[in-house]
């Protein structure tokens, strides 16, 4: 099953049609995912257009389904409408894709979109991560997100739609100069192309170089954090063993992993000045609080304190590969990392149960040590209440993983088995 994000606009309509043509003789089933943002008076009409278009293509013999979600939330005071819409749209696309058992979501961004993103990020004084723009392919939240046309100019897409006579939605909000991208497209881009004919490919290429640079920084952060982060937080002594540039890079990546979004540069700079102190301390940030506790930096998010209602929580999970699996109902994400030893066999994780503590659970913390109740294990580990958040993970009735404690010793694999380790990361509550 492959999913296509389908707004009804020219680009996504062309991508959906091209996907259907490519899938004709492959046995693929395609699902078109439409997000109704409920921001325009025409939003319901656009959704109906998309549904009708899919019905016509399905009637012509294409293996196509249509799914739509109408957003029920609204931007809060002070929110960027563009940022809010982007965040909510991707969350809705993920939910629909998972509900339809799609493993891949195709997005219709092209080279002009990438060039525009580079410029917009530069105007916001973004660092390398922002200038890197949109990745062509990324695995996130248990799904593979792909932009097959990211290197393609806009003109072939326009020609494709015209050649096939495909109807599409013309979003009137594209004329609204309140939105930064619209101002760039309408006021800046025509003059830019007139002055620099190669502006689009040059800016897209710059984004590609930034992606390579960011990949190097990510790999460096992975190396630096691997031995400095455990279930209790980020080791401050280990952090300050690094050079200033590597320390900032590692701290920025750790904060991003904790909150799910880039940390403000002002906060990173402040932490660099203040973290060396001794004793307990705290730093508030949007949606979370950072604590210096027992020589570690710990991030406590709103979702950890507020919790989630049981009816919202996922109760099953399938893990077949390494990656990060978001569990919004539990207010966090499960990070799955490949391991040569000391991990749980990947085969154990094909069908998991996610449970709350009910009392009586036994956890074995090491070889030769007896299983003990979770309460005693938490006390022995000196874990605060917010360090115990997250689901208990079971496989076939056996306790596999406990946030804050790690893997139960009884599930550790044997040499030669494909193994992974698990870690729990609270997410920022949206």
Image (spheres, rainbow, N blue to C red):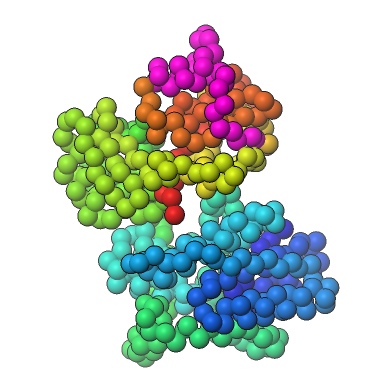
Q: Is residue 184 left or right of residue 279?
A: right
Q: Foreground: 201 or 406?
A: 406
Q: In this view, does 339 lie to the left or right of 427?
A: right
Is residue 67 among the parts visible in the rendering?
Answer: yes
Picture residue at 35% right of the left edge, 67% below the top = 77
Picture residue at 65% right of the left edge, 89% below the top = 162
> In which quadrant of the rendered image does the C terminus lie?
bottom left
Q: Is residue 189 left or right of residue 293?
A: right
Q: How many labels were placed on the picture?
A: 0
Give residue 412's position: percent from left, percent from top.
57, 22
Q: Foreground: 78 or 51?
A: 78
Give residue 387's position: percent from left, percent from top.
40, 32
Give residue 86's position: percent from left, percent from top.
47, 66
> In which quadrant of the rendered image does the N terminus lie?
bottom right
Q: Choose top left, top right, bottom left or bottom right for residue 9.
A: bottom right
Give residue 57's position: percent from left, percent from top.
77, 76
63 over 265 or under it: above or below: below
Q: Foreground: 291 or 4?
A: 291
392 over 211 or under it: above or below: above
Picture residue at 40% right of the left edge, 40% below the top = 305
Q: Choose top left, top right, bottom left or bottom right for residue 241.
A: top left
**Residue 155 counted in the magenta span:** no
Magenta span covers which residues?
352-381
Q: Is residue 311 left or right of residue 404?
A: right
Q: Foreground: 303 or 132?
A: 303
Is residue 206 among the parts visible in the rendering?
Answer: no
21 over 134 or under it: above or below: below
Picture residue at 67% right of the left edge, 73% below the top = 16
């Amino acid at each position: 099953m492959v999913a296509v994000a389908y707004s009804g606009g020219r680009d996504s309509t062309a991508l959906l049609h091209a996907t259907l043509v490519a899938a004709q003789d492959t046995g693929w089933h395609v699902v078109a995912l439409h997000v109704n943002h409920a921001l325009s008076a025409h939003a319901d009409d656009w959704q109906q257009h998309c549904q009708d278009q899919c019905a016509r293509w399905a009637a012509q013999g294409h293996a196509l389904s249509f799914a739509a979600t109408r957003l029920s939330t609204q931007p809060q005071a002070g929110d960027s409408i563009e940022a809010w819409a982007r965040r909510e749209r991707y969350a809705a696309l993920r939910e629909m894709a998972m509900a339809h058992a799609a493993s891949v979501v195709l997005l219709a961004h092209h080279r002009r979109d990438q060039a525009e993103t580079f410029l917009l990020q530069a105007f916001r004084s973004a660092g390398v991560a922002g200038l890197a723009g949109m990745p062509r392919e990324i695995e996130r939240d248990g799904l593979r997100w792909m932009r097959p046309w990211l290197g393609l100019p806009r003109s072939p897409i326009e020609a494709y739609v015209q050649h096939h006579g495909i109807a599409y939605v013309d979003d009137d909000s594209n004329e609204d100069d309140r939105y930064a991208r619209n101002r760039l497209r309408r006021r800046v881009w025509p003059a830019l192309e007139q002055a620099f004919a190669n502006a689009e490919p040059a800016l897209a290429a710059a984004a590609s170089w930034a992606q390579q640079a960011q990949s190097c920084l990510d790999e460096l952060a992975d190396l630096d954090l691997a031995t400095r982060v455990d279930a209790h937080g980020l080791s401050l002594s280990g952090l300050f063993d690094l050079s200033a540039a590597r320390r900032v890079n590692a701290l920025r990546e750790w904060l991003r992993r904790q909150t799910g979004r880039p940390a403000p540069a002002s906060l990173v700079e402040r932490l660099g000045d203040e973290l060396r102190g001794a004793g307990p301390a705290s730093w508030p940030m949007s949606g979370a609080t950072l604590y210096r506790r027992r020589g570690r930096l710990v991030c406590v998010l709103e979702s950890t304190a507020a919790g989630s209602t049981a009816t919202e929580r996922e109760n099953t999970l399938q893990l077949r590969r390494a990656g990060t699996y978001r569990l919004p109902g539990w207010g966090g994400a499960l990070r799955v990392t490949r391991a040569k030893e000391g991990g749980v066999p990947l085969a154990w994780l094909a069908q998991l149960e996610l449970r709350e503590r009910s009392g009586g659970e036994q956890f074995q913390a090491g070889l030769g040590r007896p299983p003990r109740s979770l309460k005693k294990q938490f006390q022995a580990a000196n874990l605060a209440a917010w360090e115990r958040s997250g689901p208990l993970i079971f496989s076939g009735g056996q306790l596999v993983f406990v946030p804050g404690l790690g893997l139960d010793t009884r599930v550790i694999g044997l040499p030669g088995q494909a193994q992974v380790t698990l870690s729990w990361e609270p997410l920022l509550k949206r």
